[in-house]
Amino acid sequence: MKKNIAIIMGGYSSEFKISLKSGNVVYNTLNKSNYNAYRIHIFKEKWVYVNANNEEFPINKNDFSFTENGTKTTFDCIFNAIHGSPGEDGLMQAYFELLNLPHTSCGMYQACLTFNKRDCLSTLKPYGILTAESYYLNLGDDYNKQDIVNKVGLPCFVKANKAGSSFGISKVHHIEDLDQAIETAFKEDDEIIIESYLDGTEVSIGVINYKGDIKVLPITEIVSENDFFDYEAKYLGKSQEITPARLTKAQEELANKEAKKVYQILKMKGFSRSEFIFKNGKPHLLEMNTVPGLTNESILPQQANAAGISMEDLFGNAIEEALK
């Protein structure tokens, strides 16, 4: 008997348009002989099922069901394609876990932790995971620009602590530009992280649960045409994404080891994509994404393809692993 799969997409953050693209790719790719797929739009103002005619039916939040023409539909599993809040920060995970509904993403605690860049990096440092030098600010804090530069140097990156897709991020070359960068980051979040610039090869490493085992996918090298891997570079073609990355065998083995180690330390499940920069021959962790982009152009599907895993298999496996 075919399973009913809710593909949740949209969300409450600046990433909602990207999430809708990811969700629709999953919807169009899932094997229809194995699954009944349903598009569920999650927005602050409405949670709705959207049918093939783009008609909307409200979701009953008591049991995450909907009723169409007098027929009630419930779900066997949730495929999470929401980038940012509430799909990547633990809110939806907690909700589904309360309803005892299987879902394809990591657990609530792991989602909360990884979504908070500075908490995640602080958790991993005692395990020997290398990171950039960092300086933290909360909205309303007084700060001294010279103290920041003394800690992280120039150039540096100013980032919203809990945001994705490079929203709210600036590369700062001059101390007098720090105020504007901090203001930009605070438009996305009430916490920011300021990090030292790591000059080296940037790579993205996907790690997934695949057929019961932890699998590290072929590494992607990021070569941005812009000053860094910003929104344009990620989504508007202003970068080269080279899979497999042009690394030495030793670098590849070290990066794979670190990515798998991070996945295991955090007790992850489902998809993850971790960003590293090589400095002095060693990978330094920038962040982990637990609901990475899932379009045909996205990095994780590219990596899966290089590993001989089709999009249909990638998405179907995620559901089967969740149903276990």
Image: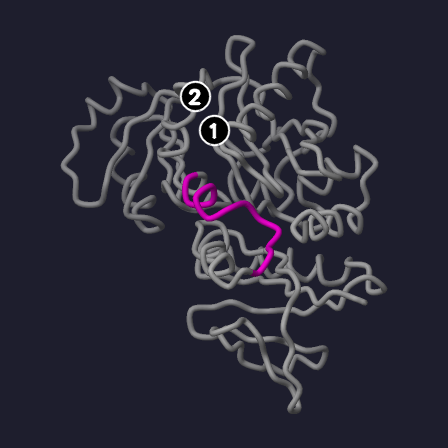
Residues drawn in magenta? 101-113
Asked whether 11 or 60 is in front, the reply is 60
Q: Is residue 181 left or right of residue 257?
A: left
Quadrant assignment, res 31: bottom right
Residue 119 position within the rendered picture, expressed as x and y whole percent measured from the top left? 36, 34
Residue 41 position within the rendered picture, expressed as x and y whole percent measured from the top left? 56, 69
Check disc 2 and report the residue beneath it.
Answer: 131
Label tally: 2
Q: Which mark is residue 286?
A: 1
Q: Residues within 10 Å of mark 2 (few under 14, many from 20)?
A: many
Instruction: State the scheme by which the image is colored.
Output: one colour
> Does dot 1 land on a helix, a strand or a loop?
strand
Q: Is residue 201 left or right of residue 132?
A: right
Name above or below for residue 208 compared with residue 22: above
Q: Is residue 218 left or right of residue 292?
A: right
Residue 305 position within the rendered picture, expressed as x and y whole percent measured from the top left? 79, 39
Question: Residue sitting at 67 percent across and 38 percent down?
Answer: 209
Residue contact between numbered discs 2 and 1, judged by CB atoms under 8 Å: yes
Name above or below for residue 301 compared with residue 4: above
